[in-house]
Amino acid sequence: MISRDSILHRPKSNFAYGYDEETLHIRIRTKIGDVDKVTLRIGDPYIWTKGGADGGNLEASDGSGWSGVNVEMTKEVTTEYHDYWFASFKPSHKRSRYAFILESSEERLLVGERRMITLTKDNTWVLSDLSNFFCFPYLNKKDVHTIPDWVKDTVWYQIFPDRFENGDKSIDPKGVEPWGSRPKHHNFNGGDLQGIINRLDYLKDMGFNGIYLCPIFEARTNHRYDTVDYMTIDKGLGDKAKFKELVEKAHEKGIKIMLDAVFNHMGSESPIWLDVVKNNEKSKYSDWFHINKFPVYDKPYDELDGRYLNYETFGRVKSMPKVNTENPEVIEYFMEVGKYWIEEFNIDAWRIDVANEVDHHFWRRFRDEVKSVKEDVFLLGEVWHDAGAWLQGDQFDAVMNYPLTDAMKQYFCTRTINKSEFIHAVNQVKVSYSLQVTEHNFNLLDSHDTSRLLTTASQDIDRIKLSYFFMMTQLGSPCVYYGSEIPMTGKHGGGLEDHRKCMTFDHIGSDMHTFMTDIIKMRHEHEEFKLYDNKWLDHDSLLIFKKGDLHVVINPTQEKQTLELDKSYLSYFDKNQVKDSMTIPPMGYCLLK
Amino acid sequence: MISRDSILHRPKSNFAYGYDEETLHIRIRTKIGDVDKVTLRIGDPYIWTKGGADGGNLEASDGSGWSGVNVEMTKEVTTEYHDYWFASFKPSHKRSRYAFILESSEERLLVGERRMITLTKDNTWVLSDLSNFFCFPYLNKKDVHTIPDWVKDTVWYQIFPDRFENGDKSIDPKGVEPWGSRPKHHNFNGGDLQGIINRLDYLKDMGFNGIYLCPIFEARTNHRYDTVDYMTIDKGLGDKAKFKELVEKAHEKGIKIMLDAVFNHMGSESPIWLDVVKNNEKSKYSDWFHINKFPVYDKPYDELDGRYLNYETFGRVKSMPKVNTENPEVIEYFMEVGKYWIEEFNIDAWRIDVANEVDHHFWRRFRDEVKSVKEDVFLLGEVWHDAGAWLQGDQFDAVMNYPLTDAMKQYFCTRTINKSEFIHAVNQVKVSYSLQVTEHNFNLLDSHDTSRLLTTASQDIDRIKLSYFFMMTQLGSPCVYYGSEIPMTGKHGGGLEDHRKCMTFDHIGSDMHTFMTDIIKMRHEHEEFKLYDNKWLDHDSLLIFKKGDLHVVINPTQEKQTLELDKSYLSYFDKNQVKDSMTIPPMGYCLLK
């Protein structure tokens, strides 16, 4: 008997969605190893050769009179407990009803929305009993999640502006500390926009074609997530003319610019918040935040304890009062902010901070507004967990793909999961979303919010190389945190800020810098990496998978491993012909075709 | 071992949602009979007594330092293959991270978002490893699905206007046929708004307090789903003054009015469509529809075949061209229509025709617009299948609950499912949605789109009585199709329109009329029917369940059945004390407390 209780399908989700205005994608989940074959039975509810609503013009495939067809599904991936099956289909008139036929050696089972029925020769009518079929009512173009094409060709470089390069000492913040001094919560090192402009060629030469900039608007801290004015560049970083210059020069070099949208909360020194602090209920901004009790401050600011506040905050951080994004005035204000930096400065993307704590309504409106001024602007949400609720096409284009991050770190760097756990985790992330999301999702190994990868890997450079190499072979758009090419170390937490250290540029031509440049070049040269499938091949110790005609081979062990070759491969890194077998050195990797 | 592969939970769905701005509802699905106890482990990610982001002020429950608490879940319902478990929780600061602890005699299993882990004494740290927890990031008020309270107190009466009562012969459509003549696709019988006004007391006396009116705007057919003018009352029904009178008089009697919003398609005689037919590409309305090729009509209208058209339609019906609801002009037009009838006539609800074939974007906007002019307007979608995608709070308030309809018909009327299949089906519908949806969902047994219940029940009046009796005991808002109180027969399909016959009023005081009046009275008198739980009790033949202190007893068999009573019950229908046991006659039913 096929296990009924494991089967999962739900229309209008990652299990059934429009991929484009003509194509439906359908998935179903079954218990691992339980089913040999799955067939999608699908068609238009109104097209019948006999009977049915209005007659029909297509031949029925089962003699029932319904025009539905059978499409064999492919086994998409396997996760720890499940197999996933996939098919795509182009409905003739946008409407679809469908069911699944699951086959094992013991049984053929029809899976419909209301019932699962064992198929026998006496009940073939259930193959056309549309009242038990799933429904994808109409493939409306507007509901299709459309994501800017350029994203999948982008390799991002994330910059924490205060720590990248000081290009203009004349605008250094007061009390700036020497470049390279140990980062603290509240010190400044003087990195600025001119510094980034200075290094555009450096980034271009490495192959980066997108920059994700942590906040640059006026703020009080070095991280600038405590915005004071959303319409001003922080004067420690430069001014609007300088930012315009940065965007223009970046664009000339084919580099996209993504800014950080911190709309969940404001900084406690923003004039808007200060007006509420001063005037309390009487402030015209009193409803711009979540204030549980007036006065807002029941003691001097310095004495306030984040755990006991009269207002809601990000986390329990008193300097970050949470914004009331349900207030129509607030909505209008942020819509203008969102459009202003696109219209006036031609930025390419917004990365959305603490995206999941703001209401969905706000993001739906935001998407509509910013896409109305630049159709191919990219919206990236900061969501660390399963983000399906934000990725249905009405809110974000993609999210920071931390579940994949964790799998890569655990397999390559900390060795806390084994190969099959790794493969299952990689697969699980993919089936959690539509194909278009996975094609554009934002893959990363570390960020300003995590320890640096080298620290996670206990300083083992080989391990981080395998991680980056693997990430570059995966569809999505990969991001490298500034300094990873040195590579930098840095622990997050424990009161330290070592993951946000000052960048240096004396490593050019070093082993890691060359490695990073090579793998970015490799990524840009191979369309195969944009394929969905990792065709995982068996090997006791090596991680091997096919992307199209390419073979990706990774040896995550400390021993050399032998790879028996059943035909001639051509190594990507050294172009020698190899025969019979090849040896992959400890912590080695290569690309074969 | 607990069956991992059957377990299902996904945040921001029917498995985890805000019930109100303070309360989170959490569900998890397990394999039927597999688990004895489930505990929800939940808390704020930022509140720790030691460690954590910013310290904390609550005591940890497991010594880890995290402030999460354990909440025992109740077994909500059982479906054919699964048990569902439920808990509600009020997060202290709107943020929640959570996992589940499943217990069987063999194992305690922690279910997190990324991994399931058997709990041992050595790994209690996983109870606070929030990186593996599910996330409900923030309980934003705006995202909570709020549904007008009055709906759950409403018992609806559905009227097909041409066939209810002819109250004004002076406005009869040309060629009107005699009242009671056999319904055809294209004849008129002259029912009108005055006829409905005439019968408001009749409806009030029976206990109805809501009228769902099939379309009343100008159209060409008797069903009027082929709208000609959305801003005009069809002159065969009356005029705006008459409609205003109807709404006002209904409101005086405590009766709500729901109109039918047919925005998926227009009628082929609407001036807008005719302009496109006439001017083709040059029409200012050419993008108001889905036209694949001009000319719109490639032959005279009468010769057009619904299967081969140059334009998309509802179904394959040439007289119903599908509207392009992605066109901004179209959107503005229908938003005005939606608001006009509320603002000018004070209607209470829109029933939305073919709701699932229009894009979600359109309905989100529609909800915002109509709720902005009348906050407690009710939005009911016509969706026959699993409607989760429309019931997240951003689109409809409820749907026509056809999956429940089918279960009731199959159990009580056609006897094609047995008691346990029925109970499982009833339960399945409920766990498919949030509690607030189920509390307000639109329950029905037949409609203008189905055969009449009595025909489905092969003329067996006892069977339809059991169906109505059961429906009245369920939460949601029940609807009775006009004429069911006679009761009428009528088959849908096969070229006939017998399910839309002319109403008569010579049955007042008859057995069925009295029955219907009684059970509506019963529904209004007992708040218990608004409870979620049907506590199903064991009995070989009877269907028995508790709603609060009430016992609902139904005998769907042709034999009398004995119910052993372990205490004294009071019959609702006859107030005699009964002892020891009671006999339920064939097809009998009663309410005990």
Image: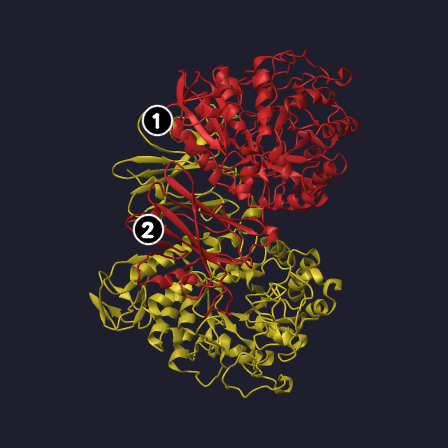
Chain colours: A yellow, B red
Q: Which mark is residue B194?
A: none
| Residue type marked 2 | Tyr
Q: Nearer the viewer, mark 2 or mark 1?
A: 2
Q: In terms of image quadrants, where is residue B111?
A: bottom left
Q: Chain letter of disc 2? A: A
**Camera sees residue B295:** no
> How crowded is the residue under tag 2: few (<14 C-alpha within 10 Å), some, or many (20+)?
some
Q: Position of residue A295 (x, y in %)?
A: 69, 66
Disc 2 secondary structure class = loop
Disc 1 secondary structure class = loop
| Residue type marked 1 | Asn
Identify whether A9 is placed above or below B573: below
Q: Position of residue A403 (x, y in %)?
A: 42, 61
Residue at image location 49% in from the left, 81% down from the top: A503
According to the image, label 1 marks what residue?
A123
Residues at discs 2 and 1 in contact (Cβ within 8 Å): no
Residue at image location 79% in from the left, 28% down from the top: B241
Q: In this orientation, which residue lies closer to the viewer: A450 or A119? A: A450
Query: Are marks 2 and 1 in one subunit?
Result: yes
Quarter occupied by the N terminus of chain A: top left
> How crowded is the residue under tag 1: few (<14 C-alpha within 10 Å), some, or many (20+)?
few
Identify whether B501 is placed above or below B373: above
Identify whether B6 is placed above or below B151: below
Q: Looking at this view, name the residue that lies furthest to the right.
A: B241
Q: State the CA–CA distance, disc 2 to disc 1.
A: 31 Å
Q: In this orientation, which residue lies closer to the viewer: A444 or B94? A: B94
Q: Chain letter of disc 1? A: A
Q: In terms of image quadrants, where is residue A130?
A: top left
Q: Which mark is residue A81?
A: 2
Q: Position of residue B464 (x, y in %)?
A: 51, 20
